[in-house]
Image (tube, helix red, strand yellow):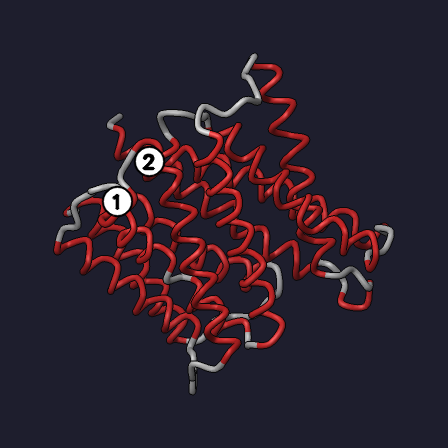
Amino acid sequence: MTKETKAALLMTAAAFFLSLVPLAVKLVPADSGVPTSEKLVARGLVAVIVTFILMKRKGESLVSGKPSLLFLRSALGTIGMILYFVALETLPLAETVTVNKLSPFFVLLFSWIFLGEKLKKVQILAICTAFAGVALVARPTGMTFNNAMLLALASAVFAGAAYTTLRALRNYDSPLRVVFWFSLFSVTAFLPKTIVDGVMPTRATILPLLGIGVAGVLGQVLMTSAYRYATGGRVAIYGYLSVVFSVLWQITVFNDVPTAPVLAGAALVMTAGWINYKLG
């Protein structure tokens, strides 16, 4: 198995588990009183515990080989999450997700500018095809660049920058170490507000909250590993598969059959993945 094939498989698996995160969030009862900060802490706290145990079992050190770069990755990722969730509080879900899915484009751009990775014409075609598919799935209408939309766009920029640093970190830190410190950083950032505004988990919320954390850590570890085996441009496109998985959850979990534009968009996303994998 080539490195590029391994990266594609890892990123596909990451997209699957990361698509479970919003599903788990949706399964938290709306009347439970659980604030957004508590959901973010649940995701980060589980990741901290799981990655710490795995690192200890493998005998890995917690000390980073490049602390400044790891701090940058953690800060960029956390800022991206904050902006994304703030945008979600104002914008419709479809519009926010559509804009946030621009992050792979910024991975391409930043990988080209800062890491010197080449950008092929066919990769540009794949990205454009995937974006068109995401646009169809989201069916955005009347999007204007108001403050909330700018926050969503900024979240994509920071997410793309965070993913780009994973390529630079591949020679210094393991995927487990990267996820551990990123998760600890995010927990530290969101914990104060959770202490003030959070509520005790109940039987109705404990499983979804754990699901947010478990799915999040699996997705992060797999995604971090994927970026170690291939360039940002070749691996980022597979992140769009999370949209396809989300369509499946919409059908199977919520019994809501997508419209024709949504199905057409999902087909475009898969086509883009094929173009990038076979021709990129």
Q: Residues within 10 Å of mark 1 (few under 14, many from 20)?
A: many
Furthest residue to the top?
A: 59
Please give the name of the residue rendered at 47% of the width and 74% of the height, measured from the top-left corner. 95
Q: Where is residue 14 in the image (x, y as percent from the top left)?
A: 46, 42
Instruction: Mark 2 and mark 1 in contact? Answer it, CB < 8 Å.
Output: yes
Q: Nearer the viewer, residue 260 or 226?
A: 226
Of the image marks 2 and 1, the number of the one nearer the N terminus: 2
Report which residue position mark 1 lands on.
234
Q: Which amino acid does label 2 sit on?
A: Ala
Q: Which amino acid does label 1 sit on?
A: Arg
Q: How crowded is mark 2: few (under 14 residues within 10 Å), some or many (20 or more)?
A: many
> Where, by quadrant of the figure, is residue 249 drawn?
bottom right
Q: Position of residue 185 (x, y in %)?
A: 61, 41
Q: Nearer the viewer, residue 160 or 27?
A: 160
Q: From the viewer's perspective, tell me whether residue 140 is left or right of residue 107.
A: right
Which numbered tag is attached to residue 118?
none
Q: Position of residue 121 (x, y in %)?
A: 12, 56
Assign a secondary structure to mark 1.
helix
Please give the name of the residue rendered at 38% of the width and 68% of the height, measured from the top-left corner. 263
> Where, by quadrant of the figure, is residue 215 drawn?
top right
The N terminus: image quadrant? top left
Which numbered tag is attached to residue 7?
2
Assign a secondary structure to mark 2.
helix
Q: In this view, does 111 lie above or below 98?
A: above
Q: From the viewer's perspective, tell me whether residue 139 is left or right of residue 219.
A: left
